[in-house]
Image: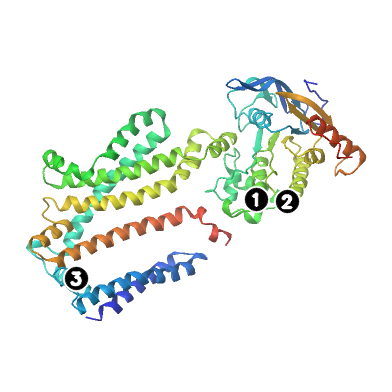
Amino acid sequence: MSTINPRSQALAGARIRERAPAEPGPGRQGARSGWWRRAASPIALLVIWQLTNVFHLVSATKLPPPTRVVSEAWTLISTSSPAYGGTLQHALLVSLERMAIGFALGGAAALVLALVAGLTRLGEEGIDPLMQMVRTLPLFGLVPVFIVWFGIGQLPKILLIAIAAVVPLYLNAFSGIRGVDGRLRELAQSLGLNRRETITQIVLPGALPATLVGLRQSLGVAWLALVVAEQINANSGLGFIINQGEQFNQNNVIFVALIVYTILGLLTDWIVRIFERRALAWRTPVGARA
Amino acid sequence: MSAVSTPAAAPGRTEAAVTVRGLRRAFGDRVVLDDLELQVEAGEFVALIGRSGTGKSTLLRAVAGLDTGVEGEIRVAGEPARPGCGVAVAFQDARLVPWKRVASNVALGLRVDDTKTAARRALDEVGLSERSNAWPLTLSGGEAQRVSLARALAREPRLLVLDEPFGALDALTRLTMQDLVLGLWERHAPAVLLVTHDVDEALALADRVLVLSGGRIAHQTRIAAPRPRDRDSADMIELHDGLLRELGVDTKGHA
Protein backbone atom coordinates (compact mmCIF):
# COMPACT_ATOMS: atom_id res chain seq x y z
CA MET A 1 0.00 0.00 0.00
CA SER A 2 2.39 2.64 1.17
CA THR A 3 5.06 1.67 -1.33
CA ILE A 4 3.33 3.48 -4.14
CA ASN A 5 4.19 7.04 -3.20
CA PRO A 6 7.96 6.62 -3.03
CA ARG A 7 7.73 4.76 -6.27
CA SER A 8 5.85 7.47 -8.10
CA GLN A 9 8.31 9.98 -6.71
CA ALA A 10 11.14 7.91 -8.10
CA LEU A 11 9.40 7.82 -11.45
CA ALA A 12 8.99 11.56 -11.42
CA GLY A 13 12.66 11.89 -10.57
CA ALA A 14 13.63 9.67 -13.48
CA ARG A 15 11.63 11.81 -15.85
CA ILE A 16 13.31 14.94 -14.58
CA ARG A 17 16.75 13.43 -15.08
CA GLU A 18 15.78 12.56 -18.62
CA ARG A 19 14.68 16.11 -19.29
CA ALA A 20 17.57 18.01 -17.90
CA PRO A 21 20.34 17.17 -20.42
CA ALA A 22 18.04 18.21 -23.26
CA GLU A 23 18.18 21.79 -22.07
CA PRO A 24 21.54 23.44 -22.60
CA GLY A 25 22.38 26.86 -21.28
CA PRO A 26 21.95 28.68 -18.02
CA GLY A 27 18.20 28.04 -17.80
CA ARG A 28 18.85 24.41 -16.93
CA GLN A 29 19.54 24.64 -13.21
CA GLY A 30 16.55 26.89 -12.56
CA ALA A 31 14.25 24.67 -14.59
CA ARG A 32 15.26 21.60 -12.59
CA SER A 33 14.61 23.03 -9.14
CA GLY A 34 11.39 24.54 -10.50
CA TRP A 35 10.19 21.10 -11.50
CA TRP A 36 10.76 19.69 -8.05
CA ARG A 37 8.73 22.46 -6.51
CA ARG A 38 6.00 22.04 -9.09
CA ALA A 39 5.87 18.30 -8.37
CA ALA A 40 5.11 18.89 -4.70
CA SER A 41 1.42 19.73 -4.97
CA PRO A 42 0.42 16.82 -7.26
CA ILE A 43 2.27 14.44 -4.92
CA ALA A 44 0.47 15.94 -1.94
CA LEU A 45 -2.83 15.40 -3.76
CA LEU A 46 -1.95 11.73 -4.32
CA VAL A 47 -1.16 11.32 -0.63
CA ILE A 48 -4.44 12.92 0.45
CA TRP A 49 -6.32 10.83 -2.09
CA GLN A 50 -4.78 7.69 -0.64
CA LEU A 51 -5.55 8.82 2.92
CA THR A 52 -9.28 9.16 2.10
CA ASN A 53 -9.19 5.41 1.73
CA VAL A 54 -6.90 4.67 4.67
CA PHE A 55 -9.28 6.49 7.02
CA HIS A 56 -12.42 5.25 5.20
CA LEU A 57 -13.59 8.77 4.43
CA VAL A 58 -15.00 7.85 1.02
CA SER A 59 -16.18 4.50 -0.25
CA ALA A 60 -13.54 2.85 -2.44
CA THR A 61 -16.16 1.99 -5.06
CA LYS A 62 -16.92 5.69 -5.51
CA LEU A 63 -13.35 6.94 -5.29
CA PRO A 64 -10.83 4.13 -5.65
CA PRO A 65 -7.50 5.04 -4.02
CA PRO A 66 -4.38 5.47 -6.19
CA THR A 67 -3.08 2.06 -5.17
CA ARG A 68 -6.21 0.38 -6.42
CA VAL A 69 -6.16 2.38 -9.65
CA VAL A 70 -2.58 1.26 -10.24
CA SER A 71 -3.33 -2.37 -9.59
CA GLU A 72 -6.38 -2.13 -11.87
CA ALA A 73 -4.15 -0.61 -14.53
CA TRP A 74 -1.77 -3.52 -14.16
CA THR A 75 -4.64 -5.98 -14.57
CA LEU A 76 -5.83 -4.19 -17.70
CA ILE A 77 -2.32 -4.22 -19.10
CA SER A 78 -1.49 -7.83 -18.33
CA THR A 79 -4.78 -9.48 -19.28
CA SER A 80 -6.75 -9.16 -22.48
CA SER A 81 -10.38 -8.69 -21.52
CA PRO A 82 -13.09 -9.05 -24.15
CA ALA A 83 -15.29 -6.73 -22.07
CA TYR A 84 -12.82 -3.88 -22.60
CA GLY A 85 -11.91 -4.73 -26.19
CA GLY A 86 -8.52 -6.23 -25.32
CA THR A 87 -5.65 -4.93 -23.26
CA LEU A 88 -5.13 -1.34 -22.09
CA GLN A 89 -2.16 -0.88 -24.41
CA HIS A 90 -4.27 -2.06 -27.33
CA ALA A 91 -6.94 0.51 -26.44
CA LEU A 92 -4.21 3.12 -26.13
CA LEU A 93 -2.92 2.33 -29.62
CA VAL A 94 -6.41 2.49 -31.08
CA SER A 95 -7.02 5.88 -29.45
CA LEU A 96 -3.63 7.22 -30.46
CA GLU A 97 -4.25 6.21 -34.04
CA ARG A 98 -7.58 8.06 -34.12
CA MET A 99 -5.99 11.08 -32.53
CA ALA A 100 -2.98 11.07 -34.86
CA ILE A 101 -5.03 10.80 -38.04
CA GLY A 102 -7.69 13.27 -36.89
CA PHE A 103 -5.19 15.79 -35.60
CA ALA A 104 -2.96 15.53 -38.65
CA LEU A 105 -5.94 16.21 -40.91
CA GLY A 106 -7.31 19.04 -38.78
CA GLY A 107 -3.92 20.61 -38.09
CA ALA A 108 -2.85 20.54 -41.72
CA ALA A 109 -6.17 22.00 -42.83
CA ALA A 110 -5.90 24.75 -40.20
CA LEU A 111 -2.41 25.76 -41.32
CA VAL A 112 -3.27 25.77 -45.01
CA LEU A 113 -6.46 27.77 -44.40
CA ALA A 114 -4.66 30.23 -42.11
CA LEU A 115 -1.92 30.78 -44.69
CA VAL A 116 -4.35 31.39 -47.53
CA ALA A 117 -6.60 33.63 -45.43
CA GLY A 118 -3.68 35.41 -43.80
CA LEU A 119 -1.68 36.13 -46.93
CA THR A 120 -4.37 36.97 -49.48
CA ARG A 121 -7.32 39.32 -49.35
CA LEU A 122 -9.45 36.95 -51.40
CA GLY A 123 -8.55 34.07 -49.10
CA GLU A 124 -9.57 36.06 -46.06
CA GLU A 125 -12.91 37.00 -47.57
CA GLY A 126 -13.59 33.45 -48.65
CA ILE A 127 -12.30 31.47 -45.69
CA ASP A 128 -12.54 33.58 -42.56
CA PRO A 129 -16.36 33.93 -42.41
CA LEU A 130 -16.72 30.15 -42.76
CA MET A 131 -14.16 29.50 -40.02
CA GLN A 132 -15.86 31.99 -37.74
CA MET A 133 -19.05 29.99 -38.28
CA VAL A 134 -17.35 26.68 -37.56
CA ARG A 135 -15.96 28.27 -34.42
CA THR A 136 -19.42 28.85 -33.01
CA LEU A 137 -20.66 25.36 -33.89
CA PRO A 138 -21.33 23.28 -30.79
CA LEU A 139 -18.82 20.58 -31.61
CA PHE A 140 -20.43 17.75 -29.72
CA GLY A 141 -23.82 18.61 -31.13
CA LEU A 142 -22.39 17.35 -34.39
CA VAL A 143 -22.09 13.82 -33.07
CA PRO A 144 -25.63 12.65 -33.95
CA VAL A 145 -25.37 14.27 -37.38
CA PHE A 146 -22.05 12.57 -38.00
CA ILE A 147 -23.52 9.22 -37.07
CA VAL A 148 -26.29 9.71 -39.59
CA TRP A 149 -23.85 10.84 -42.26
CA PHE A 150 -20.84 8.65 -41.66
CA GLY A 151 -22.12 5.71 -39.69
CA ILE A 152 -20.47 4.42 -36.57
CA GLY A 153 -17.05 3.46 -37.91
CA GLN A 154 -13.71 5.21 -37.71
CA LEU A 155 -14.65 8.12 -39.99
CA PRO A 156 -17.01 10.15 -37.75
CA LYS A 157 -14.59 9.86 -34.85
CA ILE A 158 -11.65 11.07 -36.88
CA LEU A 159 -13.65 13.90 -38.40
CA LEU A 160 -14.83 15.05 -34.99
CA ILE A 161 -11.22 15.23 -33.80
CA ALA A 162 -10.17 16.99 -37.01
CA ILE A 163 -12.86 19.66 -36.68
CA ALA A 164 -12.00 20.16 -33.03
CA ALA A 165 -8.34 20.63 -33.96
CA VAL A 166 -8.96 23.01 -36.86
CA VAL A 167 -10.55 25.88 -35.01
CA PRO A 168 -8.07 27.12 -32.38
CA LEU A 169 -5.06 26.49 -34.60
CA TYR A 170 -6.64 28.35 -37.51
CA LEU A 171 -7.75 31.31 -35.40
CA ASN A 172 -4.38 31.76 -33.73
CA ALA A 173 -2.28 31.21 -36.84
CA PHE A 174 -4.45 33.61 -38.84
CA SER A 175 -4.29 36.36 -36.24
CA GLY A 176 -0.57 35.66 -35.87
CA ILE A 177 0.00 36.24 -39.57
CA ARG A 178 -2.15 39.35 -39.59
CA GLY A 179 -0.66 40.64 -36.35
CA VAL A 180 2.94 40.84 -37.56
CA ASP A 181 4.30 44.26 -36.65
CA GLY A 182 3.69 46.74 -39.46
CA ARG A 183 7.05 48.35 -38.75
CA LEU A 184 8.77 45.06 -39.58
CA ARG A 185 6.85 44.91 -42.85
CA GLU A 186 8.08 48.43 -43.58
CA LEU A 187 11.61 47.33 -42.73
CA ALA A 188 11.30 44.42 -45.16
CA GLN A 189 10.21 46.91 -47.79
CA SER A 190 13.11 49.26 -47.07
CA LEU A 191 15.58 46.38 -47.29
CA GLY A 192 14.18 45.53 -50.70
CA LEU A 193 12.91 42.07 -49.71
CA ASN A 194 10.61 40.51 -52.28
CA ARG A 195 7.25 38.99 -51.35
CA ARG A 196 8.57 35.48 -50.88
CA GLU A 197 11.41 36.69 -48.63
CA THR A 198 9.05 38.91 -46.65
CA ILE A 199 6.74 35.95 -46.00
CA THR A 200 9.46 33.45 -45.08
CA GLN A 201 11.75 35.81 -43.13
CA ILE A 202 9.29 38.17 -41.48
CA VAL A 203 5.65 37.09 -41.60
CA LEU A 204 5.83 33.37 -40.84
CA PRO A 205 8.42 33.56 -38.03
CA GLY A 206 6.43 36.45 -36.61
CA ALA A 207 3.28 34.35 -36.63
CA LEU A 208 4.96 31.36 -34.98
CA PRO A 209 4.37 32.30 -31.31
CA ALA A 210 0.62 32.70 -31.82
CA THR A 211 0.54 29.55 -33.96
CA LEU A 212 2.13 27.50 -31.20
CA VAL A 213 -0.38 28.81 -28.68
CA GLY A 214 -3.05 27.67 -31.12
CA LEU A 215 -1.38 24.29 -31.49
CA ARG A 216 -1.54 23.70 -27.74
CA GLN A 217 -5.17 24.77 -27.57
CA SER A 218 -5.99 22.54 -30.54
CA LEU A 219 -4.35 19.55 -28.89
CA GLY A 220 -6.39 20.14 -25.74
CA VAL A 221 -9.69 20.33 -27.61
CA ALA A 222 -8.79 17.37 -29.82
CA TRP A 223 -8.20 15.14 -26.80
CA LEU A 224 -11.62 16.16 -25.49
CA ALA A 225 -13.15 15.32 -28.85
CA LEU A 226 -11.45 11.94 -28.76
CA VAL A 227 -12.98 11.13 -25.37
CA VAL A 228 -16.43 12.09 -26.58
CA ALA A 229 -16.07 10.33 -29.93
CA GLU A 230 -14.94 7.12 -28.30
CA GLN A 231 -17.79 6.95 -25.85
CA ILE A 232 -20.28 6.80 -28.68
CA ASN A 233 -20.62 3.46 -30.44
CA ALA A 234 -16.97 2.49 -30.32
CA ASN A 235 -15.87 -1.06 -29.68
CA SER A 236 -12.29 -0.34 -28.75
CA GLY A 237 -10.22 2.49 -27.39
CA LEU A 238 -9.92 4.40 -24.15
CA GLY A 239 -13.39 5.94 -24.40
CA PHE A 240 -14.84 2.50 -24.94
CA ILE A 241 -13.12 1.33 -21.74
CA ILE A 242 -14.73 4.23 -19.85
CA ASN A 243 -18.12 3.30 -21.27
CA GLN A 244 -17.73 -0.32 -20.33
CA GLY A 245 -16.46 0.62 -16.89
CA GLU A 246 -19.65 2.58 -16.39
CA GLN A 247 -21.75 -0.37 -17.62
CA PHE A 248 -20.09 -2.77 -15.20
CA ASN A 249 -19.95 -0.19 -12.41
CA GLN A 250 -16.15 -0.42 -12.33
CA ASN A 251 -14.95 2.98 -11.18
CA ASN A 252 -11.39 1.62 -10.96
CA VAL A 253 -11.41 1.10 -14.70
CA ILE A 254 -12.85 4.53 -15.44
CA PHE A 255 -10.13 6.11 -13.35
CA VAL A 256 -7.41 4.20 -15.18
CA ALA A 257 -8.69 5.43 -18.54
CA LEU A 258 -9.06 9.00 -17.26
CA ILE A 259 -5.51 9.00 -15.99
CA VAL A 260 -4.20 7.64 -19.27
CA TYR A 261 -6.01 10.49 -21.07
CA THR A 262 -4.48 12.99 -18.67
CA ILE A 263 -0.99 11.66 -19.23
CA LEU A 264 -1.46 11.76 -22.99
CA GLY A 265 -2.68 15.35 -22.80
CA LEU A 266 0.24 16.41 -20.64
CA LEU A 267 2.68 14.57 -22.87
CA THR A 268 1.57 16.25 -26.09
CA ASP A 269 1.52 19.65 -24.38
CA TRP A 270 5.03 19.00 -23.11
CA ILE A 271 6.27 18.10 -26.60
CA VAL A 272 4.89 21.35 -28.00
CA ARG A 273 6.48 23.31 -25.18
CA ILE A 274 9.88 21.72 -25.84
CA PHE A 275 9.54 22.70 -29.47
CA GLU A 276 8.43 26.16 -28.42
CA ARG A 277 11.50 26.63 -26.26
CA ARG A 278 13.75 25.77 -29.20
CA ALA A 279 11.90 27.66 -31.90
CA LEU A 280 11.22 30.75 -29.83
CA ALA A 281 14.63 30.93 -28.16
CA TRP A 282 14.86 34.55 -29.30
CA ARG A 283 12.13 35.49 -26.84
CA THR A 284 14.00 34.18 -23.79
CA PRO A 285 17.23 36.10 -24.03
CA VAL A 286 18.80 34.56 -20.92
CA GLY A 287 20.80 31.90 -22.73
CA ALA A 288 21.74 34.05 -25.67
CA ARG A 289 24.80 35.73 -24.17
CA ALA A 290 26.58 32.39 -23.86
CA MET B 1 14.23 80.24 -49.78
CA SER B 2 12.43 77.33 -51.36
CA ALA B 3 14.63 75.60 -53.88
CA VAL B 4 17.93 74.45 -52.52
CA SER B 5 20.82 73.68 -54.75
CA THR B 6 24.41 73.29 -53.71
CA PRO B 7 27.71 72.78 -55.41
CA ALA B 8 29.03 69.23 -55.46
CA ALA B 9 30.59 68.33 -52.13
CA ALA B 10 32.47 65.10 -52.70
CA PRO B 11 34.96 64.45 -55.44
CA GLY B 12 34.56 61.46 -57.72
CA ARG B 13 30.77 61.45 -57.80
CA THR B 14 29.21 64.14 -59.90
CA GLU B 15 25.61 63.00 -59.81
CA ALA B 16 23.45 64.27 -56.95
CA ALA B 17 22.62 61.60 -54.37
CA VAL B 18 19.04 62.80 -54.13
CA THR B 19 17.00 65.11 -56.27
CA VAL B 20 13.46 65.91 -55.21
CA ARG B 21 11.22 68.10 -57.36
CA GLY B 22 7.65 69.21 -56.84
CA LEU B 23 7.08 66.74 -54.03
CA ARG B 24 3.58 66.83 -52.62
CA ARG B 25 2.00 64.57 -50.03
CA ALA B 26 -1.46 64.91 -48.62
CA PHE B 27 -3.26 62.76 -46.09
CA GLY B 28 -6.90 63.41 -46.85
CA ASP B 29 -7.33 67.18 -46.75
CA ARG B 30 -4.13 67.75 -44.82
CA VAL B 31 -1.25 68.70 -47.10
CA VAL B 32 1.99 67.79 -45.34
CA LEU B 33 4.52 68.35 -48.09
CA ASP B 34 3.78 70.93 -50.75
CA ASP B 35 5.92 71.47 -53.84
CA LEU B 36 9.06 70.57 -51.96
CA GLU B 37 12.44 70.84 -53.65
CA LEU B 38 15.54 69.22 -52.27
CA GLN B 39 18.93 68.26 -53.54
CA VAL B 40 21.60 66.40 -51.64
CA GLU B 41 24.97 66.10 -53.34
CA ALA B 42 26.92 62.88 -53.41
CA GLY B 43 28.75 62.44 -50.13
CA GLU B 44 27.08 65.43 -48.53
CA PHE B 45 25.91 65.27 -44.91
CA VAL B 46 22.57 67.00 -44.57
CA ALA B 47 20.53 67.38 -41.40
CA LEU B 48 16.82 68.01 -41.55
CA ILE B 49 15.16 69.68 -38.61
CA GLY B 50 11.65 70.92 -38.03
CA ARG B 51 9.00 71.14 -35.37
CA SER B 52 7.07 67.96 -34.81
CA GLY B 53 4.30 67.43 -37.32
CA THR B 54 6.07 69.32 -40.09
CA GLY B 55 6.50 66.19 -42.17
CA LYS B 56 10.11 65.21 -41.50
CA SER B 57 9.25 61.52 -41.37
CA THR B 58 6.96 61.84 -44.37
CA LEU B 59 9.78 63.34 -46.42
CA LEU B 60 12.15 60.67 -45.21
CA ARG B 61 9.80 57.82 -46.10
CA ALA B 62 9.26 59.36 -49.51
CA VAL B 63 12.98 59.65 -50.20
CA ALA B 64 13.47 56.05 -49.04
CA GLY B 65 10.84 54.93 -51.53
CA LEU B 66 8.55 53.66 -48.76
CA ASP B 67 5.63 55.94 -49.53
CA THR B 68 3.66 55.19 -52.67
CA GLY B 69 1.20 58.02 -52.09
CA VAL B 70 3.51 60.91 -53.01
CA GLU B 71 3.33 63.08 -56.08
CA GLY B 72 6.40 64.58 -57.68
CA GLU B 73 9.80 63.41 -58.72
CA ILE B 74 12.30 61.71 -56.41
CA ARG B 75 15.55 60.46 -57.80
CA VAL B 76 18.24 58.66 -55.87
CA ALA B 77 21.57 58.64 -57.72
CA GLY B 78 19.73 59.48 -60.89
CA GLU B 79 17.21 56.62 -60.59
CA PRO B 80 13.59 56.88 -59.41
CA ALA B 81 13.50 56.14 -55.67
CA ARG B 82 12.96 52.46 -55.00
CA PRO B 83 13.36 50.70 -51.63
CA GLY B 84 16.58 48.78 -51.25
CA CYS B 85 18.13 50.50 -54.27
CA GLY B 86 20.92 52.92 -53.46
CA VAL B 87 19.20 54.10 -50.31
CA ALA B 88 19.38 52.53 -46.86
CA VAL B 89 17.45 53.55 -43.75
CA ALA B 90 18.33 53.39 -40.08
CA PHE B 91 15.07 53.75 -38.20
CA GLN B 92 14.49 55.55 -34.95
CA ASP B 93 13.60 52.28 -33.18
CA ALA B 94 16.56 50.31 -34.64
CA ARG B 95 13.93 47.88 -35.90
CA LEU B 96 15.90 44.67 -35.67
CA VAL B 97 14.04 41.50 -36.54
CA PRO B 98 13.81 39.85 -33.10
CA TRP B 99 13.97 36.24 -34.37
CA LYS B 100 17.12 36.78 -36.39
CA ARG B 101 20.50 36.85 -34.74
CA VAL B 102 22.50 40.05 -35.08
CA ALA B 103 24.56 38.88 -38.08
CA SER B 104 21.45 37.62 -39.89
CA ASN B 105 19.77 40.96 -39.30
CA VAL B 106 22.68 42.69 -40.98
CA ALA B 107 22.70 40.18 -43.83
CA LEU B 108 18.94 40.35 -44.38
CA GLY B 109 18.16 41.13 -48.00
CA LEU B 110 21.80 41.77 -48.97
CA ARG B 111 22.31 41.17 -52.69
CA VAL B 112 25.95 40.13 -52.66
CA ASP B 113 27.57 36.74 -53.16
CA ASP B 114 28.90 36.34 -49.66
CA THR B 115 26.40 37.90 -47.29
CA LYS B 116 28.11 36.43 -44.23
CA THR B 117 31.42 38.16 -44.89
CA ALA B 118 29.68 41.40 -45.76
CA ALA B 119 27.68 41.25 -42.52
CA ARG B 120 30.77 40.44 -40.46
CA ARG B 121 32.68 43.32 -41.98
CA ALA B 122 29.85 45.75 -41.28
CA LEU B 123 29.59 44.57 -37.68
CA ASP B 124 33.35 44.96 -37.30
CA GLU B 125 33.04 48.56 -38.37
CA VAL B 126 30.51 49.39 -35.68
CA GLY B 127 32.56 47.44 -33.13
CA LEU B 128 30.01 44.70 -32.54
CA SER B 129 31.56 41.63 -34.15
CA GLU B 130 31.59 39.81 -30.82
CA ARG B 131 27.80 40.15 -30.60
CA SER B 132 27.13 38.80 -34.07
CA ASN B 133 25.53 35.64 -32.69
CA ALA B 134 23.34 37.40 -30.11
CA TRP B 135 19.56 37.73 -30.19
CA PRO B 136 18.46 41.35 -30.73
CA LEU B 137 16.41 41.38 -27.52
CA THR B 138 19.61 40.95 -25.51
CA LEU B 139 21.18 44.12 -26.90
CA SER B 140 21.27 47.51 -25.21
CA GLY B 141 19.67 50.45 -26.99
CA GLY B 142 23.03 51.73 -28.24
CA GLU B 143 24.08 48.29 -29.45
CA ALA B 144 20.81 47.84 -31.30
CA GLN B 145 21.32 51.16 -33.07
CA ARG B 146 24.85 50.16 -34.03
CA VAL B 147 23.52 46.93 -35.55
CA SER B 148 20.93 48.97 -37.39
CA LEU B 149 23.71 51.23 -38.73
CA ALA B 150 25.75 48.18 -39.75
CA ARG B 151 22.72 46.77 -41.56
CA ALA B 152 22.26 50.03 -43.46
CA LEU B 153 25.97 50.38 -44.26
CA ALA B 154 26.36 46.79 -45.47
CA ARG B 155 24.15 47.79 -48.41
CA GLU B 156 26.82 50.35 -49.46
CA PRO B 157 24.13 52.98 -50.08
CA ARG B 158 24.56 56.12 -52.12
CA LEU B 159 22.19 57.70 -49.62
CA LEU B 160 22.01 56.83 -45.95
CA VAL B 161 18.79 57.99 -44.32
CA LEU B 162 18.91 58.31 -40.54
CA ASP B 163 15.55 58.82 -38.83
CA GLU B 164 16.36 60.30 -35.42
CA PRO B 165 18.48 57.24 -34.76
CA PHE B 166 19.83 58.53 -31.46
CA GLY B 167 16.62 60.01 -30.10
CA ALA B 168 16.00 57.23 -27.62
CA LEU B 169 19.58 56.95 -26.36
CA ASP B 170 21.09 58.49 -23.26
CA ALA B 171 23.25 61.59 -23.73
CA LEU B 172 26.59 59.80 -23.37
CA THR B 173 25.71 56.99 -25.78
CA ARG B 174 24.37 59.58 -28.21
CA LEU B 175 27.73 61.35 -28.35
CA THR B 176 29.54 58.05 -29.00
CA MET B 177 27.06 57.22 -31.73
CA GLN B 178 27.49 60.63 -33.36
CA ASP B 179 31.24 60.05 -33.49
CA LEU B 180 30.65 56.60 -34.96
CA VAL B 181 28.36 57.97 -37.65
CA LEU B 182 30.89 60.67 -38.56
CA GLY B 183 33.66 58.09 -38.82
CA LEU B 184 31.58 55.80 -41.01
CA TRP B 185 30.50 58.70 -43.18
CA GLU B 186 34.09 59.83 -43.71
CA ARG B 187 35.19 56.29 -44.61
CA HIS B 188 32.32 55.32 -46.92
CA ALA B 189 31.26 58.76 -48.14
CA PRO B 190 27.57 58.11 -48.67
CA ALA B 191 25.30 61.11 -48.78
CA VAL B 192 23.54 61.31 -45.42
CA LEU B 193 20.09 62.66 -44.70
CA LEU B 194 19.75 62.89 -40.95
CA VAL B 195 16.38 63.72 -39.47
CA THR B 196 16.72 65.08 -35.97
CA HIS B 197 14.94 67.32 -33.51
CA ASP B 198 18.23 68.19 -31.86
CA VAL B 199 19.76 71.41 -33.19
CA ASP B 200 23.05 70.70 -31.44
CA GLU B 201 23.26 67.32 -33.13
CA ALA B 202 22.56 68.83 -36.53
CA LEU B 203 25.25 71.48 -35.99
CA ALA B 204 27.80 68.96 -34.79
CA LEU B 205 27.41 66.62 -37.75
CA ALA B 206 26.06 68.23 -40.88
CA ASP B 207 27.49 70.16 -43.82
CA ARG B 208 24.14 71.75 -44.23
CA VAL B 209 21.09 72.07 -41.99
CA LEU B 210 17.65 72.30 -43.55
CA VAL B 211 14.58 73.57 -41.73
CA LEU B 212 11.32 72.00 -42.83
CA SER B 213 8.32 74.26 -42.36
CA GLY B 214 5.00 74.79 -44.13
CA GLY B 215 5.49 71.73 -46.28
CA ARG B 216 8.79 72.79 -47.83
CA ILE B 217 12.40 73.52 -47.03
CA ALA B 218 12.00 76.98 -45.53
CA HIS B 219 15.57 77.68 -44.58
CA GLN B 220 19.03 76.29 -44.89
CA THR B 221 22.28 76.93 -43.10
CA ARG B 222 25.66 75.84 -44.35
CA ILE B 223 28.27 74.96 -41.77
CA ALA B 224 31.82 75.30 -42.98
CA ALA B 225 33.58 74.73 -39.66
CA PRO B 226 35.84 71.65 -39.65
CA ARG B 227 34.85 68.74 -37.43
CA PRO B 228 35.05 68.15 -34.50
CA ARG B 229 33.24 71.38 -33.84
CA ASP B 230 33.28 73.43 -30.72
CA ARG B 231 29.66 74.07 -29.89
CA ASP B 232 30.64 76.88 -27.54
CA SER B 233 32.45 78.92 -30.18
CA ALA B 234 30.84 82.25 -31.06
CA ASP B 235 30.11 81.14 -34.65
CA MET B 236 28.35 77.97 -33.57
CA ILE B 237 26.28 79.76 -30.95
CA GLU B 238 25.19 82.23 -33.59
CA LEU B 239 24.21 79.42 -35.98
CA HIS B 240 22.44 77.65 -33.16
CA ASP B 241 20.36 80.67 -32.22
CA GLY B 242 19.64 81.40 -35.87
CA LEU B 243 18.24 77.90 -36.35
CA LEU B 244 16.17 78.12 -33.18
CA ARG B 245 14.69 81.37 -34.45
CA GLU B 246 13.82 79.63 -37.71
CA LEU B 247 12.08 76.96 -35.69
CA GLY B 248 10.14 79.68 -33.92
CA VAL B 249 11.84 79.28 -30.57
CA ASP B 250 12.47 82.38 -28.49
CA THR B 251 16.25 82.64 -27.95
CA LYS B 252 16.43 85.61 -25.61
CA GLY B 253 17.57 83.39 -22.80
CA HIS B 254 20.55 82.18 -24.81
CA ALA B 255 23.76 83.86 -26.01
Circle nearer the N terminus (1, 2): 1
Could you tell me which quadrant the N terminus of chain B lies in? Answer: top right
Q: Are marks 3 and 1 on the same chain?
A: no
Instruction: Quadrant for the C terminus of chain B, please.
Output: top right
Q: Are marks 1 and 2 in contact (CB under 8 Å)?
A: yes
Residue B6 x, y percent position in the rendering:
82, 25
Query: Are tags 3 and 2 found on a single chain?
Result: no
Q: In the rendered structure, which amino acid carries the disc numbered 2?
A: Thr
Question: What's the colour scheme?
Answer: rainbow
Callout 3 touching callout 2 (CB < 8 Å): no
Please name whichever residue, A234 or A112, is drawn nearer the observer in this view of the structure. Answer: A234
Q: Chain of mark 2?
A: B
Residue that carries the numbered disc 2 in the rendered image? B173
Residue A247 on image: x %, y %: 8, 60
Dot 3 corresponds to which residue? A69
Query: How far apart are labels 3 and 2 at the CA level?
Result: 65 Å
Amino acid at dot 3: Val
Image position of B142 (left or right of A79): right
The circle drawn on residue A74 is: none
**B2 versus B200 height, above or below:** above
**In the structure shown, which secondary structural element does the residue marked by tag 2 occupy?**
helix
Q: Residue reaching furthest right?
A: B234
Q: Which residue appears at 89% of the width and 44% of the height?
A: B232
Residue that numbered label 1 is attached to: B141
Disc 1 marks a residue whose amino acid type is Gly
Looking at the picture, how far across and down is residue A205, in whole percent? 47, 45
Which residue appears at 24% of the width and 48% of the height? A101
Horizontal relation, residue B173 to residue B58: left or right: right
| Chain holding disc 3 | A
